[in-house]
Image (spheres, rainbow, N blue to C red):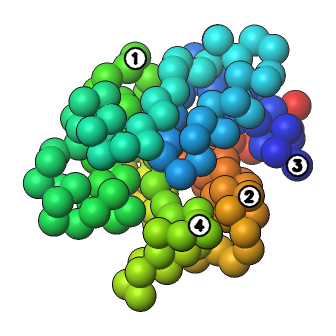
């Protein structure tokens, strides 16, 4: 299923002559790994940022320290800044960003384990979404990667399959 999603993304981006960047925290580069598993991905995948720490989010993506302090790493404000920062710090036309709490620790009553924020930046603007997943660390991360790729299809206007 994930390979099919990547194939559809590749087809759409190749058809548009556009590039993609990924900014990941809780998924640790899993999206970038899946994208680069596909031969020829350098034609449409520009780069990936694995920004696990707050310092990395600030230094690599330009996420404001105030945003991280006020809202936290797992928040709409942060993930939107990550996606927009990925565009600003790359030659990509689209970006996907993910920040969440995969567990088994790190959750709070306000942000329990399984909370994941996503953002997709495109020429027309940035959209974001929060989802809550059940399962262990691997399950939360796998579900987050799947959601990130599925929603990316809509953002780039992908249809059909390869």
Residue 149's label in the rendered image is none
In the displayed structure, does residue 73 sit left or right of residue 122? left
Q: CA distance from mark 3 to mark 2?
A: 17 Å
Residue at the (64%, 12%) spot, across then down: 42
Q: CA distance from mark 2 to mark 4?
A: 9 Å
Q: Earlier in the sequence, mark 2 or mark 1?
A: 1
**Could you tell me residue 150's position as x and y percent?**
68, 53
Q: Earlier in the sequence, mark 2 or mark 4?
A: 4
Q: Earlier in the sequence, mark 3 or mark 2?
A: 3
**Could you tell me residue 5's position as x and y percent?**
78, 43
Which residue is disc 3 drawn over?
A: 1
In the displayed structure, does residue 35 sit left or right of residue 151? right
The secondary structure type at the circle numbered 4 is loop
Q: What count of labels does the image hold?
A: 4
In the displayed structure, does residue 42 sit left or right of residue 18? right
Q: Earlier in the sequence, mark 4 or mark 1?
A: 1
Camera-near label (3 vs 4) is 4
Residue at the (79%, 24%) spot, across then down: 37
Say whether marks 2 and 1 touch (CB < 8 Å): no
Residue 103's label in the rendered image is 4
In the displayed structure, does residue 139 sit left or right of residue 56? right
Q: Count residues near mark 1 (Cα–Cα under 10 Å), then give few for <14, some for 14-19, many for 20+.
A: some
Camera-near label (4 vs 1) is 4
Q: CA distance from mark 3 to mark 4?
A: 24 Å
On the image, which quarter does residue 12 sit in?
Answer: top right
Residue 138's label in the rendered image is 2
Which quadrant of the figure contains the C terminus?
Answer: top right
**Could you tell me residue 91's position as x and y percent?**
40, 17
Which residue is disc 1 drawn over?
A: 91
The secondary structure type at the circle numbered 2 is helix
């Amino acid at each position: 299923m994930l390979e099919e999603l990547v194939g559809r993304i590749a087809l759409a981006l190749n058809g548009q002559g556009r590039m993609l960047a990924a900014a990941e925290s809780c998924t640790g580069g899993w999206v970038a790994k899946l994208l680069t598993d596909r031969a020829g991905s350098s034609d449409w995948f520009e780069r990936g940022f694995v920004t696990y720490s707050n310092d990395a989010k600030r230094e690599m993506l330009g996420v404001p320290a105030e945003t991280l302090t006020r809202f936290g790493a797992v928040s709409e404000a942060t993930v939107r800044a990550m996606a927009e920062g990925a565009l600003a710090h790359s030659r990509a036309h689209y970006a996907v960003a993910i920040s969440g709490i995969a567990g088994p620790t790190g959750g709070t009553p306000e942000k329990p384990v399984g909370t994941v924020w996503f953002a997709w930046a495109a020429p027309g603007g940035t959209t974001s979404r929060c989802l809550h997943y059940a399962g262990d660390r691997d399950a939360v991360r796998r579900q987050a990667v799947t959601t990130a790729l599925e929603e990316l299809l809509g953002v780039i206007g992908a249809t059909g399959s390869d």
